[in-house]
Amino acid sequence: MVNMNNHCTKVIVDENEIDKIFDLPMDILDEIVKDMSFQELVKTCVLSKKWVHFWTMHPILVLDWEFFEEKSGTIGLIENGFSKMIDNILLHHVGSLVKFFLDLSTIDCNDRDLDHWLLCETSKCVKELTLKNHKRKRYTLAFCVFDCPTLTYLDVTNFIVKPPSPKALFPNLLELTLKFIKFCPDKANYVLNTPLLYSLTFIACNGVHFLTISAPRIQFLTVHDSHDIYAIFFDNLSNARELFMVVNTLSEENIDEVTHYLEDPNCVDKRFEKLEFVELREFEGTQFELLFLKLILAYSPSLSRMIVEPSDELDVAEVLNLYEELRMSLKALLRAKVIIAPHGQDV
């Protein structure tokens, strides 16, 4: 290989010397290139003959929005063009996968294509799986995802979730993030057995009440605009240590349903022994919010800190008055430090 230095002098570099980099242990090479985009990784094939197929062995495969935009030159995509490209990429990839990231937001594909791709990836013992979809069209999450015991991280956006059987086991799952998910049961509720799960996030999900999550090691629960999470929290996630909720306005039907549930004296049959921190954002002071707050305060003996952020339509003084009335109604000594934070202010 011939190169030119700053003084325009020819510098001859032995190609075998360059290949000494490739001779490093595979795990070190993977660590060196782990932050490269997939496009940059493929370009390493020009370094030497040994590097031609290096990208096919790398355990991280990220096909994100930037990748598809760069390959197409524009945001608009040629019909079926990227489906064939993804087929070829997966066909040539060898070995196991640590991480697979796929953004479907700007490409044309169907459920059959997606099922095929996910079957390829789950068969490679993938550990971290991220599926993004910001189109109106919702895809159905492939059955093979529920049969992948190696998953430790799962992040899915805008899918229909319909497990192949009432019970699913994720023995190694640590983090689960579900955004704009619609749960569609057939006859029975879903049971997700996640013995190691410590972080769970629901954002704008529907049909969550059809879900039963067995997560004895849960620590962090985040909920945003998923009104039917209340039943799940009280029934299944009493081991959570931190709860973060963004409370948005519900429809009248949903408000009545949630309020009726929270007013039932049997809705809580256990204490939240490990809950230490709660943060509620966009608090509006509605009846169901006050009921939920009251139950949290009454059944959380380890609670040490709570942050309540009022919505734009509610000021700090109003929330303080509501909290004081709530505290008096409980007729108990509350040890938790409650902070009323102005809207948009970090505490």
Image: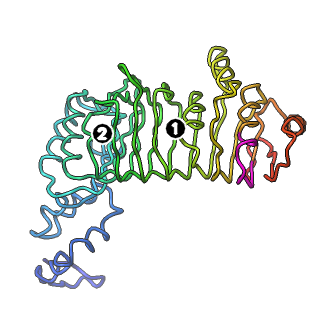
Three-letter code for the amino acid on which mark 1 is drawn: Phe
Q: In the displayed structure, does residue 329 sit left or right of residue 293?
A: right
The residue under label 1 is: 202
Q: Which residue is mark 2?
A: 146
Q: Residue 302 magenta-drawn?
A: yes
Which residue is at 65% across, 44% downward? Answer: 271
Q: Nearer the viewer, residue 162 or 3?
A: 162
Q: Is residue 316 visible?
A: no
| Percent position of residue 88, x then y | 14, 44
- The quarter of the picture where residue 117 lies is top left
What amino acid does circle 2 point to? Phe
Residue in view at x 12 percent, y 46 percent: 91
In-image side of 200 versus 287 (left or right): left
Q: State the extent of the magenta-drawn residues as a range.
A: 296-306
Residue 154 at what x, y percent from top left? Answer: 39, 46
Nearest-to-viewer mark from 2 and 1? 2
Q: Residue at x 33, y 38 (%)?
A: 168
Q: Residue at x 36, y 62 (%)?
A: 35
Q: Secondary structure at mark 2?
A: helix
- Nearest the camera: 115 or 197? 197
Q: Quadrant of residue 319?
A: top right
Residue 330 in the image: above or below residue 112: below
Tell me if mark 2 has few (under 14), some (14-19) or many (20+) residues whose alpha carbon lies within 10 angstroms of its own. some
- Residue 120 spot, x, y in % from top left: 18, 44
**How many numbered marks does the figure carry?**
2
Instruction: Compare residues 105 and 188 and report the one nearer the observer.
Output: 188
Tell me whether the residue at label 2 lies in contact with that at label 1, contact meaning CB atoms closer than 8 angstroms.
no
